[in-house]
Image (cartoon, rainbow, N blue to C red):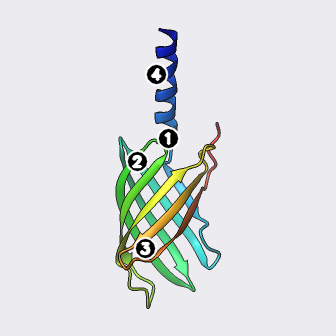
């Protein structure tokens, strides 16, 4: 019985921790970008995000929604404000929450097949 209770507590703790991604995140994927922010919100197993980036002074905005399971986020994004000469209109983000809860790391893939790294750091660090 103790083993079952212990396993249940571990499961509940990991579920609660895994979904603690609500908040403001700075985009640290590439130094060529400035004023990069993502706002992430979770409701049940759904994740919602809005992302603002400036590249050479040009704003880029996308928003998305998808799912969160354990410490992994996967969501579809739609570009609402493009950077001149960028042709991407949508894509997918796949991210994993770090054990300390302060970094989301993964990759994007856009509708044109471009793939690259994504790293978001929590604006207000999560304290365990």
Which of label 4 and label 1 is nearer to you?
A: 4
Considering only order in the chain, which callout, 1 or 4, is on the residue closer to the N terminus? Answer: 4
Q: Quadrant of residue 99?
A: top right
Q: Earlier in the sequence, mark 3 or mark 2?
A: 3
Residue that carries the numbered disc 3 in the rendered image: 61
Q: CA distance from mark 3 to mark 4?
A: 41 Å
Q: Mark 3 and mark 4 in contact? Answer it, CB < 8 Å.
A: no
Name which of mark 2 and mark 1 comes first in the sequence: 1
Q: Earlier in the sequence, mark 1 or mark 3?
A: 1
> Which mark, residue 90?
none
Left or right, 93 with reference to 55: left
Residue 127 place in picture, x, y as percent = 65, 40
Q: Position of residue 124 (x, y in %)?
A: 62, 51
First along the sequence among labels 4 and 2: 4
CB under 8 Å between discs 4 and 2: no
Dot 1: within a 10 Å radius of its alpha carbon, few (fewer than 14), some, or many (20 or more) residues? many
User: CA gap, disc 3 to disc 2?
Assistant: 22 Å
Q: Nearer the viewer, residue 9 or 58?
A: 9
Residue 56 in the image: above or below residue 23: below
Dots 2, 1 in contact, CB < 8 A: yes
List the residue tagged with mark 1: 18
Circle number at residue 68: 2
Q: Secondary structure at mark 4?
A: helix
**Image coords of residue 56 (percent x, y):** 57, 86
Q: Residue at x 38, y 58 (%)?
A: 75
> Real-space Cα distance between discs 1 and 3?
26 Å
Q: Secondary structure at mark 3?
A: strand
> Which of the numbered marks, if any, corresponds to residue 8?
4
């Amino acid at each position: 019985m103790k083993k079952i209770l212990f396993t249940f507590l571990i499961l509940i703790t990991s579920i609660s921790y895994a979904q603690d991604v609500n908040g403001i995140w700075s985009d640290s994927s590439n130094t060529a970008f400035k004023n990069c922010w993502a706002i992430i919100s979770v409701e049940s197993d759904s994740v919602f995000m809005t992302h603002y980036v400036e590249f050479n002074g040009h704003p880029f905005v996308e928003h998305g929604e998808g799912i969160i399971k354990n410490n992994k986020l996967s969501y579809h994004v739609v570009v609402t404000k493009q950077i001149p000469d960028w042709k991407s209109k949508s894509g997918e983000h796949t991210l994993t929450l770090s054990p300390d809860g302060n970094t989301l790391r993964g990759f994007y893939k856009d509708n044109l097949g471009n793939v690259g790294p994504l790293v978001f750091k929590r604006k207000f660090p999560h304290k365990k």
